[in-house]
């Protein structure tokens, strides 16, 4: 009983973390069709910036804002000056984002050295809370709450605002959106920055659980890819459901089938791809 | 006036020529010793690589880059922690830079990747870090000596200590799922169970696991302790999450040498307090040689030395002693290699060290406990096991006849 309860809670927490990681990736891919392989590096860079701010100012909220802001600036520059020039050339974009990921991770190594560093948990969220018979870390519950909050916020943005409608129009039919006078160019930058901000903030929020260390980027990127492929590229609902599905599969898979630990993540992805190549909630992209 | 200027410039030209030739002439008398150094400066293992570099640099700096009257030319290569790259860089060091001896590499899988080439090119190599058991056991390479112990070497005594001194009966283990983690855990399990303990649960987490939550959730709550064997950042991540789940105050943690290594201990907090581990080194060893060393490292690099810093420094000490034995004639490879294999350091930061016939040190193993001293986390010494061999108290022949330690060997018979 204990086991099922605590592992379910673990799965939820991990799912929340995965959503914070992959929402931005999904958003960017959905609109711009760019598989941004720098996403893991953005996540790590955000965490490092957050760490520095946390050490200097001691405020976790400020650290999240700073982490997000730093990655927005970086992402904005990359989108405007590099990806923009390669629009429509998928292979070139993939390669350039991969190259940028290497550059970012080397720069992080240079600035923050290679020492692994944990981000401290904010004072108010330390300790455990009793849920039924098990003690569970408060911070992890907070991460799930935040993921839900972010999901709700993004849903509102996409469904209830004008800019959301423009983004949806762009995802559905780019040509038509252009024809209707939507400035797709500005929209691209805005969405890319939003995706980058989510990665940066996610990095800081994940910091107390994951710690930040060289290699965090390459540990995280495949997870984001798996979530988005499973959930359906470009669908926020897909990213949300995918995150929690993967959270559960990952946690229970490791616990119940330890011999399959290395494959467990990819099994659901393969099954979904075989039966429903567009992912659980994906549309067929044109 | 004009001719005067001309002859003057001639003079200057001659002077320049002489100045240019001087170092060449000096070096013709005694060429520098070319020391190749394989380390990791990029990627996930860069922190350990940097610490190794600091250890070796300190060693050479203290000696003004001169050993036994000969200058030492240090040629550093970055392997990025990738075995294929390690092999390329080793070939480059040997064939292009014509190094006399190599110190490195960092990781066991790197050392294994160059094993055949080392043998074929007959290049003496001193390992400052790679601890894979078989390199000095069932697959001995005559050109390979180790300046650190094997994976299991400190954890044989720890197993005994846990059963006899701590009187723990039931222990769960969790470790990185790769050779280093397997060997450490097996060594610990063997002596712990031989002394009456029971390993009731064994968990293996992938090296790049995203989160330890699902593993921590599985740990049996009725054990006396958890033995956690991690390398790199994982020790820090595990202990932090273990504490986060409120387990730290309920089930004590025993660690491998690298779980609470000084290199990561400096970034840990209360979650590491009280962890008992074993290693061939701790910055807290009370001896004049070590106190001097720790002071020097702190002065140069602002941190306590740990596994990697000490390993590289120790490799330097090995090199120095062997060079002394052959009067600096490193070109006589046979004599140099023989001298290297006879290494016997009477004193050094780690205490007395003698190489066994397989090229692996017999050294002191320190049982350590993380404590806070002057606001800083340190590994205080609880007990010293003197002169511990890689074979512990077992007969080497019988030890070698059995298979190397793996995930399932020796088998755990008390799992529940």
Image (tube, rainbow, N blue to C red):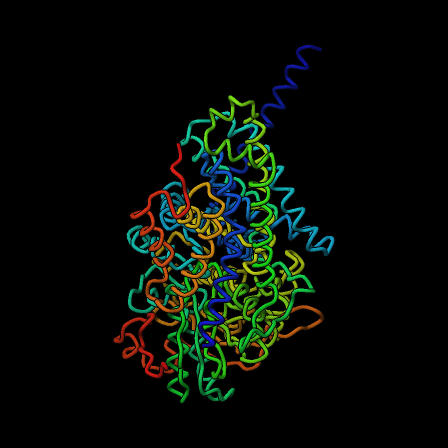
Residue A273 spot, x, y in % from top left: 33, 47
Which sits in the foreground, B397 or A154?
Answer: A154
Residue A172 position, x and y percent, is 46, 33
From the image, which quarter does the C terminus of chain B lie in? Answer: bottom left
Residue B389 shows in this picture: yes
Residue A157 in the image, given as x and y percentages of width and height: 59, 41
Q: Nearer the viewer, residue B133 or B270?
A: B270
The one nearer the camera, B290 or B250, is B250
Is residue B9 shown above or below B140? above
| Residue, far front | A160
Residue at the spot 49% in from the left edge and 57% down from the top edge? A15
Q: For the point 42% across and 59% down, which residue is it?
A: B126
Q: Residue furthest right?
A: A57
Identify the residue shown where x is 47% and y is 89%.
B164
Q: Residue A92: x and y, percent?
A: 42, 30
User: In terms of depth relative to the viewer, which is nearer, A196 or B26?
Assistant: A196
Q: How many marks?
A: 0
> Does residue B22 lie above or below B67 as drawn?
above
- For residue B186, side relative to residue A154 (left or right): left
Quadrant hosting residue A71: top right
User: In this rendering, does residue B348 appear at all?
Assistant: no
Residue B11 placement: quadrant: top right
Q: Quadrant of the N terminus of chain B?
A: top right
- Outermost residue on the top side: it is B2
């Amino acid at each position: 009983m204990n086991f099922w309860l605590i592992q379910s809670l673990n799965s939820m927490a991990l799912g929340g973390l995965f959503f914070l990681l992959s929402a931005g990736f999904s958003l960017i891919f959905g609109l711009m069709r760019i598989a941004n392989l720098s996403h893991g590096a953005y996540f790590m860079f955000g965490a490092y910036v957050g760490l520095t701010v946390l050490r200097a100012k001691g405020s976790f909220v400020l650290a999240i804002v700073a982490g997000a802001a730093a990655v927005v600036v970086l992402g904005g520059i990359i989108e405007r000056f590099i990806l923009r020039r390669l629009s429509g050339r998928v292979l070139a974009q993939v390669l350039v984002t991969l190259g940028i990921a290497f550059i970012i991770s080397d720069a992080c190594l240079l600035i923050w050295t290679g020492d692994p560093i944990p981000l401290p948990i904010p004072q108010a969220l330390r300790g455990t809370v009793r849920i039924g018979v098990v003690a569970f870390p408060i911070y992890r519950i907070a991460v799930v709450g935040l993921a839900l909050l972010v999901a709700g916020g993004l849903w509102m943005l996409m469904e209830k605002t004008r800019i959301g409608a423009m983004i949806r129009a762009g995802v559905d039919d780019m040509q038509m959106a252009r024809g209707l006078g939507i400035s797709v160019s500005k929209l691209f930058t805005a969405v890319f920055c939003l995706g980058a901000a989510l990665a940066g903030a996610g990095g800081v929020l994940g910091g107390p659980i994951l710690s930040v260390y060289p290699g965090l980027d390459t540990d995280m990127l495949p997870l984001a890819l798996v979530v988005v492929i499973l959930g359906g590229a470009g669908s926020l609902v897909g990213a949300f459901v995918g995150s929690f599905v993967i959270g559960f599969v990952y946690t229970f898979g490791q616990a119940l089938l330890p011999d399959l630990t290395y494959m467990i993540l990819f099994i659901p992805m393969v099954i979904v791809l075989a039966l429903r190549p567009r992912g659980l909630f994906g549309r067929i992209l044109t | 006036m004009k001719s005067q200027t001309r002859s003057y410039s001639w003079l200057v030209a001659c002077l320049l020529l002489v100045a240019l030739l001087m170092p060449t002439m000096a070096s013709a008398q005694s060429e520098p010793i070319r020391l190749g150094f394989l380390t990791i400066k990029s990627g996930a293992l860069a922190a350990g690589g940097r610490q190794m570099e600091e250890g070796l640099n300190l060693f050479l700096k203290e000696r003004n880059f001169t050993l036994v009257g000969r200058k030492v030319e240090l040629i550093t290569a970055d392997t990025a922690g990738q075995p294929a790259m390690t092999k390329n860089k080793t070939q480059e060091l040997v064939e292009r830079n014509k190094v006399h001896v190599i110190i490195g590499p960092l990781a066991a899988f790197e050392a294994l990747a160059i094993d055949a080439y080392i043998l074929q090119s007959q290049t003496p190599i001193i390992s400052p870090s790679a601890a894979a058991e078989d390199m000095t056991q069932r697959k001995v390479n005559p050109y390979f000596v180790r300046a650190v112990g094997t994976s299991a070497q400190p954890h044989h005594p720890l197993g005994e200590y846990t059963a006899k001194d701590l009187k723990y009966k039931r222990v769960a283990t969790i470790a990185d799922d790769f050779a280093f983690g397997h060997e450490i855990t097996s060594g610990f399990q063997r002596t712990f169970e031989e002394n009456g303990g029971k390993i009731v649960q064994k968990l293996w987490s992938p090296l790049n696991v995203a989160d330890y939550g699902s593993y921590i959730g599985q740990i049996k709550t009725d054990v006396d302790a958890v033995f956690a064997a991690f390398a790199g950042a994982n020790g820090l991540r595990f202990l932090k999450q273990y504490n986060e789940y409120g387990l730290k105050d309920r089930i004590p943690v025993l660690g491998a040498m690298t779980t609470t290594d000084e290199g990561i201990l400096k970034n840990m907090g209360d979650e590491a307090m009280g962890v008992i581990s074993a290693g061939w080194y701790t910055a807290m060893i009370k001896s004049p040689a070590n106190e001097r060393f720790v002071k020097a490292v702190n002065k140069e690099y602002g941190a306590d030395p740990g596994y990697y810093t000490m390993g590289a420094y120790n490799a330097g000490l090995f090199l120095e002693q062997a060079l002394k034995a052959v009067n600096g004639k490193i070109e006589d490879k046979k004599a140099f290699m023989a001298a290297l294999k006879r290494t016997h350091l009477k004193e050094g930061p780690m205490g007395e060290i003698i190489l066994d016939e397989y090229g692996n040190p017999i050294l002191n193993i320190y049982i350590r406990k993380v404590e806070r001293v002057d606001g800083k986390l340190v590994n205080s010494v609880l007990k010293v096991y003197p002169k511990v061999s890689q074979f512990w108290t077992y007969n080497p022949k019988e030890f070698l006849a059995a298979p190397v330690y793996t995930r399932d060997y020796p088998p755990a018979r008390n799992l529940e």
